[in-house]
Image (cartoon, grey):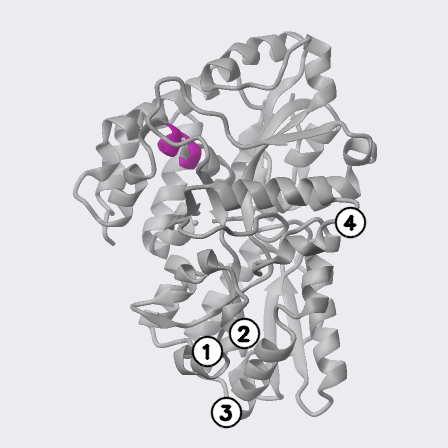
């Protein structure tokens, strides 16, 4: 099944192993999404003057919630206005990097926390918010504990967790399974058995936007966990020598490449980008049977997929176990939240506007309800009380249960690692899926950047 897309619209998503000591809410809608690069204003960064500024991601339906939050704040604060710009995922990363380097960052920086936030902290580019959180304990106390570690660097808080908890989900098209008379896979062995059956019916087993690279990464994150347990990546994150050569890691890399060689993904997957939702379209049109992707894709499939969601053709579950694997099948991976930081280069007045936005509008009741209405679970304690009256209640409960019962909720690798190591990772993941490197070559290449 081949599809042609615009190669300029690539995107990235991204995680850090977070042990779940307390129940959390789960869900969808947030990370690298879709849509062209657009802008709501022509304002520059904070250093350019003209008041506080806020840059964030475009892409429906998430951008509407972000915009509504700013609109509410500006209406309530006529003397402390926020000017906004929004960009498609990868374009955003480039713009922020350039702006930070030029000393013209926006007042408020949207991000994923983890390694990316640490790089900003190490460069002295973002404000230490530890004392502010101490003075605003109520703001911090309502945030899910699982979201806090990725906002914390060396014991200090540099960002406010916000928006949604978004695990990675195993989606499937019920009608595609009916066509071959099969049930959803309960193990890795089932997955491999299904591949030739779907291909025989001219249905791609899995949709994958391989050009975006981070989409491929989600497969490895699950396979490392399911085969060897969460400690396999924990060793990599801890900088242990040759940790990528763990036998469980080599086995995971081998099994995923075996799926590629068995034609487990849509033809031409390496030229499909996630930013334009082409991979999702393969699933909801029935040209692909399954897809491993972020919970944030539910909203766009509901809105763009006709009766795929409303007609009960969409199925979803946690990633199945691997036969003989050591991993806990309740573990999940994904985004424990999204994160807003404040530029250290902003003026005192701009910082005060940002902090007022954090205290009064970020994670407000209205903001939470907007996310729930979009099929998302906000990163807030007790938010499940808002699910009952929504059309997406079953989906929301699934995500809540998935995340709350996970013994480990792992942050995306390319966010947990440093930006430099993450780029090497994504490059080698692309090569692995294109069969340009072997599993051992992948491990050798990655061992060279451990700890960087």
Whichever of callouts 1 and 3 sits on the residue coming sooner in the sequence is: 1
Mark 2 near mark 1, Cβ–Cβ under 8 Å?
yes
Q: From mark 3 to mark 4, how far is it between C-alphas?
A: 41 Å
Residue 224 among those drawn in magenta: yes
Would you place residue 158 above or below residue 131 in this image? above
> Which residue is labeled 3 in the image?
348
| Image coords of residue 189 (percent x, y) | 46, 14
Query: Dot 3: what SS?
Result: helix
Whichever of callouts 1 and 4 sits on the residue coming sooner in the sequence is: 1
Name the residue at 68% across, 85% down. Answer: 81
Would you place residue 79 above or below residue 408 in this image? below
Name the residue at 63% across, 15% down. Answer: 183
Name the residue at 62% across, 19% down. Answer: 204
> Which residue is labeled 2 in the image?
139
Location of residue 350 by image quarter = bottom right
> Which residue is labeled 1 in the image?
133
Whichever of callouts 3 and 2 sits on the residue coming sooner in the sequence is: 2
| Image coords of residue 181 (percent x, y) | 68, 8
Query: Dot 1: what SS?
Result: helix
Location of residue 124 by image quarter = bottom left
Mark 2 near mark 4, Cβ–Cβ under 8 Å?
no
């Amino acid at each position: 099944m081949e599809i042609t897309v615009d190669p300029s619209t690539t995107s990235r998503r991204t995680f850090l192993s977070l042990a779940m000591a307390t129940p959390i809410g789960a869900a969808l809608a947030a990370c690298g999404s879709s849509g062209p690069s657009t802008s709501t204003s022509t304002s520059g960064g904070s250093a350019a003057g003209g008041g506080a500024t806020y840059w964030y991601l475009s892409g429906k339906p998430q951008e509407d919630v972000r915009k509504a939050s700013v609109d509410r704040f500006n209406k309530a604060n006529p003397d402390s206005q926020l000017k906004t710009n929004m960009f498609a995922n990868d374009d955003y990363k480039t713009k922020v990097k350039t702006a930070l380097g030029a000393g013209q960052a926006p007042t408020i920086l949207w991000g994923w926390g983890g390694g990316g936030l640490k790089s900003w902290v190490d460069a002295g580019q973002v404000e230490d918010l530890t004392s502010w959180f101490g003075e605003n304990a109520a703001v911090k106390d309502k945030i899910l504990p699982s979201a806090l570690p990725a906002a914390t660097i060396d014991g200090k808080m540099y960002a406010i967790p916000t928006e949604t908890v978004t695990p990675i989900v195993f989606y499937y098209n019920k009608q595609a399974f009916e066509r071959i008379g099969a049930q959803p896979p309960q193990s890795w062995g089932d997955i491999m058995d299904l591949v030739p059956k779907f291909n025989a019916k001219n249905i791609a087993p899995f949709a994958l936007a391989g050009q975006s690279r981070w989409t491929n990464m989600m497969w490895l994150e699950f396979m490392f966990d399911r085969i060897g347990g969460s400690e396999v990546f924990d060793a990599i994150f801890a900088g242990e020598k040759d940790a990528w050569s763990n036998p469980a890691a080599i086995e995971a890399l081998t099994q995923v490449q075996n799926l590629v060689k068995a034609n487990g993904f849509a033809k031409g997957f390496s030229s499909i980008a996630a930013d334009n939702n082409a991979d999702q379209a393969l699933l909801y049109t029935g040209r692909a049977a399954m897809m491993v992707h972020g919970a944030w894709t539910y909203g766009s499939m509901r809105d763009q997929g006709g009766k795929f969601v409303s007609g009960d053709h969409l199925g979803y579950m946690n990633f199945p176990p691997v036969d003989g694997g050591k991993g806990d099948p309740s573990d999940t991976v994904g985004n424990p939240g999204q994160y807003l930081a404040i530029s250290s280069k902003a003026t005192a007045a701009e910082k005060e506007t940002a902090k007022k936005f954090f205290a009064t509008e970020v994670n407000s009741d209205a903001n939470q309800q907007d996310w729930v209405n979009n099929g998302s679970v906000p990163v807030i304690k007790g938010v499940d009380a808002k699910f009952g009256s929504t059309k997406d209640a079953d989906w929301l409960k699934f995500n809540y249960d998935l995340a709350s019962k996970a013994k480990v909720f792992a942050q995306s690798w390319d966010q947990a690692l440093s930006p430099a190591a993450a780029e090497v990772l994504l490059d080698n993941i692309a090569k692995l899926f294109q069969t340009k490197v072997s599993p051992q070559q992948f491990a050798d290449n990655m061992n060279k950047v451990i700890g960087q």
